[in-house]
Amino acid sequence: MEGKLIVVEGIDGSGKSTQIHLLEKWLGYKGINVFKSEWNSSEMVKEITSKGKKKGLLTPTTFSLLHATDFADRYERNILPLLRAGYFVLADRYVYTAFVRDIVRGCNPDWVRKVYDFAIKPDLAFYFKVPVDIAVDRILVGRPKLKYYEAGMDLNLSNDPYESYRIFQGRIIDQYDSMAVPEGFTIIDGTLNIEEQQKTVRKMIMPLLPHQVPSKKVRRTQS
Amino acid sequence: MKHKQRELGGRPVEFYGHGINHLQDVEIKGRLIVIEGPDASGRSTQIEKITARLEADGHAVLNTGLKRSELVSKGILEAKQNYDLGRKTLALFYAADFADQFEYKIIPALQAGYIVLADRYIYTLIARNVVRGLDKRWCHNLYGFAIKPDLVFYLDVEPSVLIHRVFQKNLSLDHYESGADIGFSNDMYESFLIYQNKISREFHLMQKRYGLIPINGNRTIAEINSDLQHRIDQFLDKVMHS
């Protein structure tokens, strides 16, 4: 494969999207062809998934399959062709998100993994590890309401969406943690400040860059 | 397998693969009968006749088919029109549609004691995917959540006979059912024959693995119907009196 695939994983509020955004800007600044792909963003599937979500109709199996459809669409349309064309593809969530969420929802782990076994292994997978309370606080700031599936209400963990969300996210963290070593995640401490995290991320990316790129850091501030 | 405290006439379900967690202990009383076969093989006519007969005999019958879920069916049609979908994407889309109907229609009806007559099941979906070059093991695993039907008939029609039935029905060949998306031939007629032959070959391969019962579909509607009805009656007779 000509290109490189870099993945960020972690629960909502772990800061991964900020980090991948900074990474995208940095690579772009260096003149590298970058493409970013976000979880659950295929136009075609999004509409259907959101319809089903609104109605609260999704079973763990259909939830899993619709997200797999979304992923496959982005994979077949963008991710794979762009990797072959030599792009740096940045994925804000990858198959691991499906693994952790679907397993927490009760899908058979072996089945889920096989459904996604066409996806190539990333060159680097960063896992932004944050204690559940910190992440939940970050997410809930200025957010009066949580959505049904987002809060994991379909799992019957609690009648209170906030309590449900906390338990749900905690379980997802457990899944990520158990996957970290076997999947070879690069763990980033998501409680550190943004600049520090980004420094570590860039250091890890350096060996993947084309040779002529100077090793001097580019100083830029992001809003 | 021993099960404690079964409801009268209830049976545990048997999955093809890993199954679905929250359905592992489900008990069903109904029967699942599947009729498979290519387009224009006469499936819907047969299902209509069999449904009428079973209802006349006092059975509650539910008809299901592909692309009929509330959740995704419209989406598939729209997506097929507006986008050039990748093969894995389409395969997963169909699986989501099937899963939705499976959990919301088929399983509840079986629990309630219905005879579910399915106008195609996972086999068509698997065959289409395999013929389109998707990994066979992947395709079979995908449907590991489905249960084993009681009876699966496959209307086996010679592709050369089938094509005439298609023309009688529609006067034109369907893009997808002719495998035109695969690119076997620029000639639709030839593409149809190649594609249907490949599908038919997949069905023959699945015959043993899944216990499909081939039904000679080259005969008249009445002949096929009496063959099917006879086999279904025999089966129901056996299970009702055992």
Image: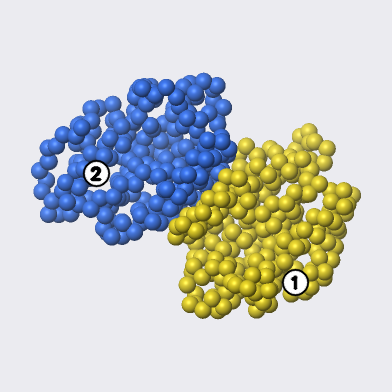
Chain colours: A blue, B yellow
Is residue B217 visible to us here? Answer: yes
Residue type of the residue flagged with mark 2: Glu
Residue corresponding to mark 1:
B216
Closest to the observer: A185 or B97? B97
The location of residue A204, given as percent across then percent down, is 22, 43
Number of the label disc, if any, that sits on residue B227: none
What is the chain identity of the residue bearing mark 1? B
- Relative depth, front residue between B78 and A35: B78
The image quadrant of residue A94 is top left
Question: What subunit carries mark 2?
Answer: A
| For residue A21, side relative to residue B92 (left or right) | left
Q: Quadrant of residue B219?
A: bottom right
- Taking the spot 35% from the left edge, 53% from the top edge, the residue there is A79
Q: Is residue B162 visible?
A: no
Element marked by disc 2: helix
- Residue labelled with disc 2: A24
Q: Distance of mark 1 from mark 2, alpha carbons?
A: 60 Å
Q: Is residue A56 above or below residue B186?
A: above
| Disc 1 residue type (three-letter) | Asn
Q: Residue at x 76, y 59 (%)?
A: B47
